Amino acid sequence: MTVKQSKFFLFAALLLVSHAVVHAQLGGLLKSVKDKAKDKTSGKPESTPTNGANTTNGVSSSENPVLNKKAEELKWEMGSSKGYSSGGLRYDMEMLEREKPIPPYQHIRKVGEPGVFHFAKDYPELNTIADPVPGNLAIDFSSAPFKGGAGVPASAFNSSTSHIYARLRVTGSTVAEVLKLTGDLSKLKVHFYVYPSDGDDIHPWEHQTVIILNAAQIKQSSLDFDIKPSPDNITRYINPTDRFDFYLSQFPFIHSNQFFTKSGNYKIGIKVAAELKDDWGNPTGKQLEVMNSFDYTFDVKDAKSVYDEGQVVMKSLQNGIKFSPKPLPKEWKLPSVAPAVTGYTAAKYNQLYNNYYKDVKIIKTYLAPAAGAPWKVIMSSDNLMPSYKYCTQTVFFFVKDASGNCYYHPCDLRQDYAGGGTYGSIYMAVFDEEKVYINCAEMK
């Protein structure tokens, strides 16, 4: 080897050593940065709930002891408003702390527990996270109306012979004082759940409605609701907007294989909630809620008779206001604005309406201006995910039915949340109880 070649190899060796030192220094620096980042986060998972196995750069949690440890800490499953899906959304205590306050009747359970009938209030370790259950509010059920003293509290009913009534009861105070309600048009939310007796990953079906109270009703110490009333024994509350909110009509009308998949035992839950306000009347972001449930034995053979009886009750309630018609609303004389949703003209709306009511004559269809953006998203009751979105352009149908009665009927378009940030097909939301009867002679 020549002197020149020796110098060349010596230079190459020095270059390799230098590269190794720099690489080691950079590696140490990067490790230091990662360690500092880890110290700041204490190695805890982000607040985003997780389902299934964790992966990092293709490495599963079973191959990564740090991620595996985190997975073991996710000991709680918290369902959406419709229960649990594929085991629910998983949390550890630190993540639950970030969600607080959690409503007392939020569906939550420990990983591995069967069924869906578990609530935040049931776990002592969640006492500092979950809101307390109000001690002066209760919901009772009975097979006879509470009004007049006939109602005797019961906890079990059946689809063949039972009639079902409910009472929201306040102890030592009034509805207004406990729920911080004032004046006419005070609102309460009523949630309706159907829990199957078997199956771990079946959603409890939920329906939410808003009832509107007048000034006299909120001064009472109780409110009565009809769930499955006898047509001869209806509580007959009519609220300020003539919507039959005190009749929870969805219960008779869900007696189908979509909600009651087979004959057997179910648990029915009723939850009443009010948005809490401070002393100045401003929303606090919390809600006061009370819930109770009853056992319900369902037989498929009873489905049609329960549905038909519900129709009789609804028609009876409608007849109660037909003979005191309301004046025509201002919308009768106003010209329609342009459709907020492309393609949904008055003719298109009429076609959709006649799909629901085939024996009516539509006198006028009025498209009101949209209230801000064309669509508004409604979140689930626990605010974890969207429930649906509706078009803020209300459509008023002025109608004469086959019996010669006239009414106007406000409706809107909706899309149900389908998951993954997507929504299903557009449909028109039509509720019988939102019809307002008017004098036919005025529709000229």
Image (cartoon, rainbow, N blue to C red):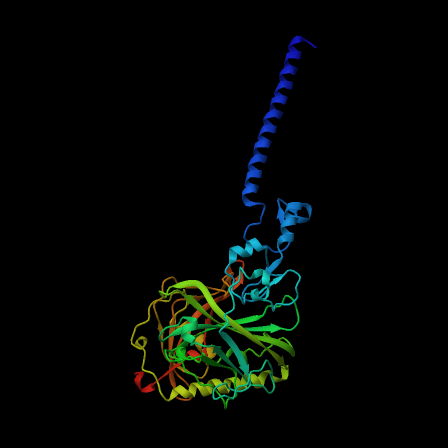
Give the residue furthest to the right. 1
Residue 23 lies, in percent from the top left, at 60, 28
Rendered image quadrant of residue 17? top right
Q: Give residue 174's position: percent from left, percent from top.
A: 42, 77
Question: Foreground: 337 or 178?
Answer: 178
Check the picture and name the quadrant holding the C terminus: bottom left
Placement of 86 over or under 12, stated as above or below: below
Q: Position of residue 265 (x, y in %)?
A: 64, 77
* Image-quadrant location for residue 220: bottom left
Q: What's the residue at 62%, 76% (across, down)?
A: 266
Residue 149, can we see it? yes
Residue 199, percent from left and from top: 66, 69
Q: 270 or 346, which is in the foreground?
A: 270
Which residue appears at 47% of the width and 89% of the height? 148
Residue most extreme to the front: 172
Q: Residue furthest top?
A: 3
Q: Is residue 174 left or right of residue 54?
A: left
Left or right, residue 58 beside residue 147: right
Q: Is residue 181 above or below residue 306?
A: above
Q: Is residue 248 visible?
A: no
Q: Nearer the viewer, residue 28 or 298?
A: 28
The N terminus: image quadrant: top right
**Numbered disc total:** 0
